[in-house]
Image: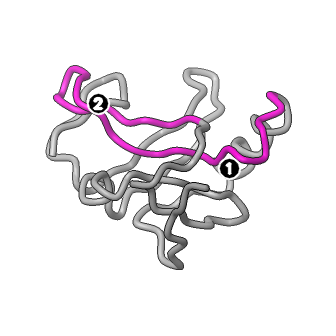
Amino acid sequence: METATINNIAPISLTPRAVEEVKIIMQDKSVPAEYSLRIGVQGGGCSGMSYLLGFDKKKDSDETYQINGVEVIMDKKHGMYVMGMEVDFQDGLNARGFIFNNPKAKSTCGCGTSFSA
């Protein structure tokens, strides 16, 4: 069985609207119980790095956090890029989707999912 560290203080936060949307997606898409919300970063995107957001199984390199009833997993190496980030969900006339408000980002692009640190 894979192990993961469960920490009390998450490096990121989820707004109530983001938590609500994650729970709706988990139920509507029948996400298996052994999956958690994965948040992280990867190389690429128009500004150099882009955000990861999806459902995945825990890996040995992950840290686990409980954020308002949602189990969040993140690779330990990604914490320095997202420390203090807030994930929100927007459901408006012009846009619908998850928004990443990252104080560590030195620059972003118009897509809202790419940044440089």
- Mark 1 crowdedness (10 Å alpha carbons): few <14, some 14-19, many ≥20: some
Magenta stretch, residue numbers: 29-54
Spot occupied by residue 44 in the image (x, y as percentages of width and height): 23, 24
Asked if residue 16 is positioned above or below residue 110 in the image, the reply reads: below
SS of the residue at dot 2?
A: strand
Observer-nearest of 44 and 35 = 35
Say which residue appears at 83% left-offset and 32% top-offset. Answer: 30
Residue type marked 1: Arg
Asked if residue 113 is positioned above or below residue 20 in the image, the reply reads: above
Between disc 1 and disc 2, the foreground one is 2
Q: Is residue 74 left or right of residue 110?
A: right
Residue under pointer 1: 17
Spot occupied by residue 113 in the image (x, y as percentages of width and height): 37, 30
Say which residue appears at 63% left-offset and 29% top-offset. Answer: 92
Residue 22 quadrant: top right
The label number, if any, that marks residue 114 in the structure image = 2
Magenta stretch: includes residue 109: no
